[in-house]
Amino acid sequence: MTDTFIDFSNALADAVERAGHAVVSVLEGGRRGVSGTLWRDSLVVATEHTIRGQQEVTIELPDGRSLPAAVVGRDPGTDIALLRATEPVASAIEFADATRLRVGQFVLAIGRRPNQCVVASHGILSALGGAWRTGHGARIDHSFRLDLLPYTGFSGGPLVDAGGRVIGVNTSGPRRTVLTVPASTVNSVVEQLIAKGRVARGYLGVALQPVNLPPAILAQTGTGIKRGLLVVMVEPGSPAEAAGITIGDVVVALDDKPLANPGDLQLALDPERIGQPARLRLIRGGKPHELTLIVRERAE
């Protein structure tokens, strides 16, 4: 065995040890417990789906102490919950520079089992992408595709680089994959949970499906937009109903930004849009139409 391989192996073990000081066990997160990340002093980030319905859990720290922790707030959109320990706990977390991440880099998923046992799984970053929306409308700053095997109890633990620096927080993806919420997104959610206990998101109150526009309508609009969003449901009492949107309308643009799929609309409804007017361009009865509505906050 070469010295280079031994050095590399030791470096990964050092990264696990370094990151492990910020990983706790959340005992009420399931039969075997799940993980949490000591994000700031006395504040632990966990996954919302593992503690759903609970207002207080028990966390087990790396030094062996067990402490109650109150749920400060939760955000199902990003699957992030924020816990506050009842006693002071210092965090020494170090964050990776997301702009320097590259496909092919080694990454480690870190977790903590009950009774102080740190666990790790390694793999590589197999793809990097831009912002995307979850099914609940939450904006995630970056997408990471990982070639990494998740184990039971890893949800809430960090994804770290080969130096033990935190890239984000892991949660369960479809078909036993790992989804990582980037640190920048987690930081934004944490700030809002501290301030309000929840994350505000824009809401129109419509169900949409993408459709191709017929050539005759394309000629009338003269915009070059070839796809739109067919309104298939309008929620009673919603901003959309108040503005006069009806089933059968085809939404083609929001503030002159084309909308080709429902995700395009979700990406435009950031918290900053709440309470602000939005101008929608529609096709109604085969004719161009325009209206303005006020974006409201989605109910919890």
Image (cartoon, helix red, strand yellow):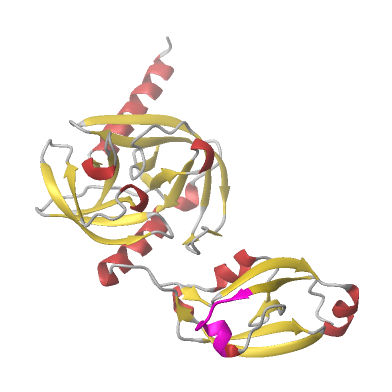
User: How far from the left and from the top, in percent, is residue 48?
Assistant: 34, 53
Queried whether the magenta region covers residue 236, the answer comes back as yes
Quadrant position of the C terminus in the picture = bottom left
Looking at this view, is 100 or 28 the one in front?
28
Using the image, determine if residue 266 lies above or below residue 275.
above
Residue at position x 12%, y 35% in the image: 64
* Magenta extent: 233-242
Exactly how many numbered labels are in the figure? 0
Residue at position x 44%, y 74% in the image: 298
Queried whether the magenta region covers residue 191, the answer comes back as no
Using the image, determine if residue 39 lies above or below residue 279.
above
With 161 as the anchor, is 68 left or right in this view? Answer: left
Looking at this view, is 270 or 204 the one in front?
204
The picture quadrant where one finds residue 287 is: bottom right
Residue at position x 34%, y 38% in the image: 164
Residue 64 in sight: yes
Q: Residue furthest front?
A: 236
The picture quadrant where one finds residue 33 is: top left
With 253 as the anchor, is 32 left or right in this view? Answer: left
User: How far from the left and from the top, in percent, is residue 63?
Assistant: 13, 37
With 121 as the anchor, is 224 left or right in this view? Answer: right
User: How far from the left and from the top, in percent, is residue 92?
Assistant: 22, 47
